[in-house]
Amino acid sequence: MIVADLHLHTQASDGLYTPEEIVSLALSKKLTAIAITDHDTVDGIDAALAAAQNTGLLVFPGIEFSTTYEDKEVHILGYCLNHKSTVIQGLIKELNESRFRRLEAMVRKLRDLDYQITLDEVLEKTGTAPGRPHVARVLVEKGYFPNIAAAFDNLLEKGRPAYVKRFKLTPQAAINAIEAAGGFSVWAHPGQVEDDGLLTKFITYGLKGIEVYHPEHDAAQTVLYEQLAQKHHLLATGGSDYHGDNSGQRSNFAEFGLTRRKFDIFKYYCEQIRNTG
Ligand SMILES: [Zn+2]
Ligand SMILES: [Zn+2]
């Protein structure tokens, strides 16, 4: 039985539900623990901690950084970190600013190409992670393109005239920041990258765990990552990567995560680094 779902998104990033709603959901499923792991933000954590007070539910602070390693997108989870640490707050700020600067540069290029578009129009469309889709949406609304894909193909895709390179966070930088904030790093859903050779590299950077249980992993991958965790003495973690119910899709909230025995190891590990950190 799953007692801990350690990979959850809230409205603080791209989840459908508020931190309070996620806590209620966890209570209704009778979970022992959850971790809030929003993309590049810790804004949902305090609300979740507050909502879980006196309920018996344990809430672990977390984060999920999108990093790039040799053109591969690698997600790094941070757990049990001090989410108020200046290192984490500084890195998040840097990521936000770089996103904003990239938007600015794209709009400038588009205007040079005679597209009537302003930064304000793009910003009106954005939520927590402004990017190319928001630029594309404005271009479609203004009638320049029939759909978002066409705007990408003509202008926004890599190699096209309005493309601007993204600031790239490396796995190493993310792992370092998480460690400096007193937490530890876990490679999220490694099955999506399918390059297990990277694992030994990330371990030299300070990676402490691997996300074994995840909806994107099939049975064979789950066994593989269980074995790799054991072989490299890594913590095995897991979670549903829940973003909210998509219409037609069954909710997998609390269906992926850790059993009691594995969760006890996770919890013990968190307590250890808290005490030594
Ligand atoms: Zn991810
Ligand atoms: Zn995720």
Image (cartoon, grey):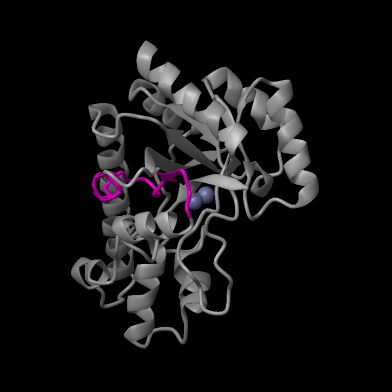
Left or right: 256, with 51 as reference point: right
Left or right: 182, with 192 as reference point: left
**Residue depicted at 51% across the width and 58% down the height:** 158
Near-viewer residue (54 or 269): 54
Q: Is residue 277 visible?
A: no
Near-viewer residue (24 or 134): 24
x and y, in percent, of residue 208 in the image: 55, 24
**Residue depicted at 76% across the width and 31% down the height:** 227
Say if 67 sits above or below 199 in the image: below
Say if 273 sits above or below 75 in the image: above
x and y, in percent, of residue 255 in the image: 59, 55
Q: Is residue 49 magenta?
A: yes
Q: Quadrant of residue 230?
A: top right
Q: Is residue 28 visible?
A: yes
Q: Quadrant of residue 37?
A: top left
x and y, in percent, of residue 155 in the image: 45, 69
x and y, in percent, of residue 205 in the image: 53, 21
Q: Is residue 33 magenta?
A: yes
Give the residue furthest to the left.
Answer: 120
Near-viewer residue (100 or 2): 2
Near-viewer residue (201 or 85): 85
The residue segment tinted magenta is 30-53
